[in-house]
Image: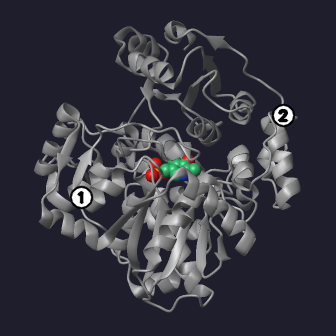
Amino acid sequence: MNYISTRTPESEKYSASYVIKTGLAHDGGLFVPESIPSLSESDIKKLAEMDYISRAQYILSLFLTDYSEPELLEAAKAAYSAEKFGGPAAPIAKVGGDYFLELWHGPTSAFKDMALQIMPRLLSLSLGKTGETKDAYILVATSGDTGKAALEGYCDVDRVRIQVFYPVNGVSNIQKKQMASQKGNNVNVVAIKGNFDDAQSGVKAIFADESAKKQLEENGLFFSSANSINWGRLAPQIVYYVSAYCDLLKEGELSCGELLDVTVPTGNFGNILAAYIAKRMGLPLGKLVCASNKNDILTDFINDGVYDKRREFFTTVSPSMDILISSNLERLLWFAVGAEKTRECMEKLNKDGVYSLDDEAMARIREDFAGYSCSEEETKQTIKNLFAECGYLCDTHTAVAAFAANKYKKESKNKMLVVSTASPYKFAPAVLSALGEEVPADDFDALDKLFEVTKCAIPKNLASLREAEVRFTKTIEPKDMRNSL
Ligand SMILES: *Cc1c(COP(=O)(O)O)cnc(C)c1O
């Protein structure tokens, strides 16, 4: 299996390990598999008898053909152990008549763990496979969740170092403590006096700084990123859709071949794109419902065929979906209209802030996708209703999906899988407020209070956080980021 760029027709072909090491194609495009492996009904039946780790090995082996089966098995075992996830990696809760796929049982209680627990191991292996003599130095600017998930994922992984920068006043106290208490010999965490943009610009400037690059090379290192457009983050996300279908089949909730609709709370379009690829492989998925918060650029795109980022940006209670440019949408464009048109659209987006697709292309996209958005008030109301009516506590991002799923269900007879992307405790103040409770000023008190009110279990990593030992205390000016390496 080889990979090609979304922006060049007749693109050169690259191996999976090269693509994982490199991240972005040389023409600025994203890497996509040149063909989609197929999954037959009998494959699905066989996978239904396996555990998550073996399912991951099987699905990844179809895409990452230059990794050996033992390598993939070992990586999956290390990533998705019951020890790390407290049980199966992606369990399903039955809520009302729907299924909620809980992707937040990993070490940081957010779905980014599903990819970031295994991707660093794939990167580490890719260095050997591509003959790379230097080790990777990962730089991350984070507004919260990605930083911690990346730190956990890269912690003590061979031939990789990671440094995370976060805005000192731009993350919650819980997020701060999560990062500052990170264990591992290859990690470093630094706070920046500034906002997220300062941290991100600083990282970009370091990536572009030839002297920094040279300094690293002299120390046997090269810069790399943990970006969500890396195929190494996308491929592991295909696994949990297949796994969810297999679980429902095994439990008799679905019959063989029965279509299952899926709703995904969407930001960068990575998670829902993985569902689309699973569907193209032959997994019997029905509609893929793209759920957005008040930042509803994707809803407008799916409904009107116009992607227009010239609009107000809102800060919401589901911050991981506050986004105006959904990078992974480029991969869907490639499937829908091919490389030449994709490049045109991306150039237009860059130059004018807007692009549009013709009716024919949009009709193809709408065969697979529907888009709904959810206001702040609707998000809170959904959390409250789900808890009152079903006894199910969900976080703000999952609530956006649950709301959209309910809207779409009127159009379909299929069963519905709602993707749940974070533990409610990760966003305890907003969840408390949605339940109509007073919100304590201290985040840790909010955790305890949410437990008192709901009696839902607190994830271990968050319960022990208040007492965790702080290892990283450095706060620097943005201009000193380069010297902190
Ligand atoms: C990142 C994130 C999302 C958005 O996922 P995309 O793959 O970027 O669409 C949704 N919910 C949570 C909790 C996240 O952390």
Q: Nearer the viewer, mark 2 or mark 1?
A: 1
Q: Is mark 2 within 8 Å of ligand 1?
A: no
Q: Is residue 351 above or below residue 112?
A: above
Q: Is mark 1 within 8 Å of ligand 1?
A: no
Q: Earlier along the polypeptide chain: callout 2 or callout 1?
A: 1
Q: Quadrant of residue 85?
A: bottom right
Q: CA distance from mark 2 to mark 1?
A: 49 Å
In the rendering, at what x and y percent does residue 367 appear?
27, 73
Q: Is residue 322 above or below residue 216?
A: below
In the rendering, at what x and y percent does residue 248 appear?
57, 82
The amino acid at mark 2 is Ala
The amino acid at mark 1 is Asp
Name the quarter where the C terminus is drawn.
top right
Task: Name the residue rendered at 39%, 57% in the picture.
Answer: 64
Task: Tell me the element at label 1.
Answer: helix
Circles 2 and 1: CB distance less than 8 Å? Answer: no
Name the quarter where the N terminus is drawn.
bottom left
In the rendering, at what x and y percent does residue 458 appear?
81, 54
Q: Is residue 466 visible?
A: yes
Q: Residues within 10 Å of mark 2 (few under 14, many from 20)?
A: some
Residue at label 1?
A: 304
Q: Which mark is residue 317?
A: none
Q: Which mark is residue 468?
A: 2
Q: Residues within 10 Å of mark 1 (few under 14, many from 20)?
A: some
Task: Name the residue rendered at 85%, 36% in the picture.
Answer: 466
Q: Quadrant of residue 402?
A: bottom right
Question: Position of 376 compared to 128: left or right?
Answer: right
Q: Quadrant of residue 23?
A: top left
Task: Pick the residue in front: 402 or 47.
Answer: 402
Task: Pick the residue in front: 77 or 456.
Answer: 456
